[in-house]
């Protein structure tokens, strides 16, 4: 709160110093231009102050999603078909490996 008051005092002092200089150098024609620029700057900074927390939350969410995506690609084992690994029996083989190979026609 103290910092906000100090900043407002500095901005007000800068405006109070600049306005007479602008009036003297432009014969009063520059005052509406400077006033419009001050208003636009005020609206822009106020909007940025309101939107900054929302943008920070969106940015952090995006970074977390990217991190998990990269981590999954770099650390996880490759997938084989719809499953990560095929089930293998603990002892011996089961299935087609038990069948004797067919005799070949070659001598």
Image: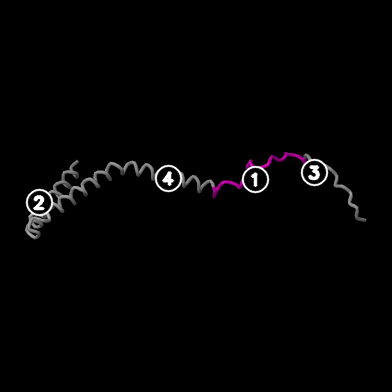
Q: Earlier in the sequence, mark 4 or mark 3?
A: 4
Would you say the residues marked 3 and 2 are in contact, meaning their CB atoms lie under 8 Å apart? Answer: no
Q: CA distance from mark 2 to mark 4?
A: 44 Å
Q: Which residues are magenta?
A: 73-93
In the rendered image, which residue does mark 2 sit on? 16
Q: Quadrant of residue 3?
A: top left
In the rendered image, which residue does mark 3 sit on? 97
Would you say the residues marked 1 and 2 are in contact, meaning their CB atoms lie under 8 Å apart? Answer: no
* Residue density around tag 2, few if under 14, some if 14–19, many if 20 or more, within 10 Å: few
At mark 3, the secondary structure is helix
Picture mark count:
4
Q: Pick whichever, 40 or 82, lies toward us.
A: 40
In the rendered image, which residue does mark 4 sit on? 62
Q: Residue at x 80, y 43 (%)?
A: 97
Q: CA distance from mark 4 to mark 1?
A: 29 Å
Q: CA distance from mark 3 to mark 1?
A: 20 Å
Q: Is residue 9 left or right of residue 72?
A: left
Q: CA distance from mark 3 to mark 2?
A: 92 Å
Q: Earlier in the sequence, mark 3 or mark 1?
A: 1
The single residue placed furthest to the bottom in the displayed view is 25
Q: CA distance from mark 4 to mark 3?
A: 49 Å
Tell me the mark number nearer the camera, choosing from 4 and 3.
4
């Amino acid at each position: 709160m103290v910092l906000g008051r100090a900043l407002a005092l500095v901005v007000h002092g800068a405006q109070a110093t600049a306005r007479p200089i602008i009036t003297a150098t432009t014969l009063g024609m520059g005052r509406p231009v400077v006033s419009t620029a001050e208003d636009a700057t005020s609206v822009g900074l106020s909007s940025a102050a309101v939107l900054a927390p929302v943008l920070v939350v969106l940015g952090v969410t995006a970074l977390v999603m990217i991190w998990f995506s990269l981590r999954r690609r770099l650390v996880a084992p490759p997938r084989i078909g719809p499953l990560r690994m095929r089930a293998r029996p603990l002892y011996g083989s089961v299935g087609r490996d038990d069948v004797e190979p067919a005799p070949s026609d070659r001598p």
